[in-house]
Amino acid sequence: MKQFAILGLSYFGKNVLEEMLDLDIDILIVDKDRELIDLYKDQPLSAVVADISSEEILRKILPKNLDGVVIDMGDKVESSILVTSYCRKLGIPRIFVKAVTDGHAEILNLVGATNVVFPNREAAKRVTPLLVSSGMLNYLPVSGNLVIAEVEVPDNLFGVSLLKANIRKSQGVNLISIKSGEDEEYGMVDPEYIFQPGDIALVSGSDEAIENFAQLKGKRGRHGLKFSDIGKLFRKAGSRVKT
């Protein structure tokens, strides 16, 4: 069974923990605030109340052969840098750390973080495109220029089969799945499926390709922004930070 430790139970750390509790893994939580630790006393996990500001303490409390750690020291930038460095010295293979600023993230990368996370920025990446376009139902940046999005099928495809539309070749978009209406569930896609009004497509591709497929090109949302501006904005911000 895989083992993970969450070092610090600020907002990001607690949210990761809530997700991990649904998985079949060993979890260790560490925080110097006993009240925070006690919130999870009835959960199937191990817990330690400790100040992890020293390498010696971490060596004593962290199990050997950990698969990874999540570090969230709140707004304590120096502490998160030190703890990240200690975890790297201990040979932990995957070190996820919450960053506060771009400069903070750069230092975290230098001292050994394998993944730097900006929780607020990641949330903004998902929410902003939904504000821009009524045709965009969900949006998830994956890496580089690749995104996964949930979009309303454009009316020019109504009555056309998936095979005939060949959107991968014609528009550079991969169709992952499709459902009829928001209350339906996604499933396997039949190449002979005929697009219908109300269909929702789960697609992957560049933001430009998805913009073209969903006929969003040039359209502006309620706040005057174009969908294509969103991808450019986040790629520019992300180019400064390794994630």
Image (spheres, helix red, strand yellow):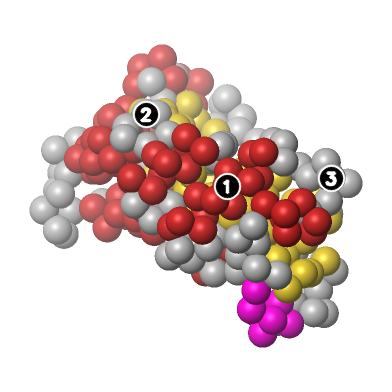
- Amino acid type indicated by mark 2: Asn
| Residue at figure coordinates x 50%, y 21% from the top left | 163
- Amino acid type indicated by mark 1: Thr
Extreme residue in the right direction: 1
Return the residue nearer the eye: 120 or 167: 120
Callout 2 secondary element: loop
Callout 1 secondary element: helix
Return the residue nearer the eye: 132 or 42: 42
Mark on residue 84?
A: 1
CA separation in Å, label 2 and label 3:
37 Å
- Amino acid type indicated by mark 3: Lys
Please indicate, yes or no, whether residue 74 appears anywhere in the rendered image.
yes
CA separation in Å, label 3 and label 1:
16 Å
Q: Which residues are drawn in magenta?
A: 32-38
Q: Which residue lies under the disc numbered 3? A: 64
Magenta stretch: residue 133 in it?
A: no
Residue 31 place in picture, x, y as percent: 66, 70
